[in-house]
Amino acid sequence: MKTRTLVSALTALVMGSLIPPSLFAQTKELRVSAAASLADVLKEIHTGFEKTHGIKVELNLGASSALVRQIEAGAPADVFISADASKMDQLEKAGLINTATREDQLSNALVVVVPADSSLAITGGKDLLKPEIRMLALGAPKAVPAGVYTREWLTKLGLWAQVEPKVLATDNVRSALAAVESGNVEAGVVYKTDAAITTKVKVAFEVSATEGPVITYPMAALKEAKNADLAKQYLEHLDTPESHTLFQKYGFIVLPEPKR
């Protein structure tokens, strides 16, 4: 028994020495911190990017505000995609992004959603004051971009002070969506793209571009990116016609290229 074990060990050692060292090399990883609302479309985009470049994209999703705190605290990241320009501005002021790579590429729209079996009729912001809506789920209105945008919209209409007591503040926009899906709240405000990924809610009202706040998704490579060249290639990939098609498939608005 000991002889067979020794032979097996020696065979494994010899076979291992014949394998090219390149096969032992770890697959390169690109670390992308992105707003939670981008989860589904990025996962599909990453499939093609990973195959083309032979790398693995490590996707860190969350509220843009939480991701900024992580990056400021030194959490490793190569690329940051925010759902709010002010969060990217915060990192830029701190000298943490490669400003040459920054671009506002996407936009979105706010919608009021209700459970799929709800009979609530909502035709505008004022209807959120209806007594039938006891709780309104949205991202934390002082931190999470979707919540910040919602507060701006309702403040513009002069309704925020009346609506605020009903608010169930969540950690990110997907959590607000989940609260409506579960039926724990009567309504919620999320992005149009979030409402499109589930059959458990329906859109009761879409905030028009003229009435709502300007929603932008800036993206940039981090100044301390471990894989700086790969980060630039990734951002270029997000700006290809193929990626634009996927963004639009998921309901995002692709912004025109800025004038140089």
Image (cartoon, grey):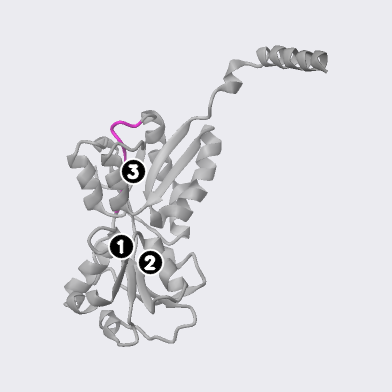
Label 3 sits on what residue type? Phe
The residue carrying mark 2 is 176
Whether residue 110 sits left or right of residue 183 in the image: it is left
Q: Are marks 1 and 2 in contact (CB under 8 Å)?
A: yes
**What is the crowding at mark 1: few (fewer than 14 residues within 10 Å), some, or many (at least 20)?**
many
Query: Which one is nearer the viewer's eye here, 181 or 222?
Result: 181
Quarter placement of the C terminus:
top left
User: Taking 52 as reference, is 223 left or right?
Assistant: left
Q: Nearer the viewer, residue 24 or 38?
A: 24
Against 1, is 165 above or below?
below
**Quadrant containing the N terminus in the rendered view:** top right
Quick one: SS at disc 1? helix
Horizontal and vertical percent position of residue 168: 32, 70
- The three-letter amino acid code for the residue at tag 2 is Ala
To which residue does mark 3 refer? 80
Query: Which of the two discs, 3 and 2, labels the residue nearer the N terminus?
Result: 3
Name the quadrant containing residue 204: bottom left
Image quarter for residue 192? bottom left
| Inter-mark Cα distance, 1 to 2 | 10 Å
Q: Label 1: which residue? A: 146
Q: Against 48, is 255 above or below?
A: below
Which residues are drawn in magenta? 217-225
| Residue 81, placed above or below residue 251 | above
Q: Is residue 177 visible?
A: yes
- Asked whether residue 221 is drawn in magenta, I would say yes
The quadrant holding residue 83 is bottom left
Q: How many numbered tags mark residues here? A: 3
In space, the residues marked 1 and 3 are separated at their CA atoms by 17 Å
Taking the view exactly as shown, the residue that stands out farthest to the front is 2
Q: Earlier in the sequence, mark 1 or mark 3?
A: 3
Residue type pointed to by label 1: Ala
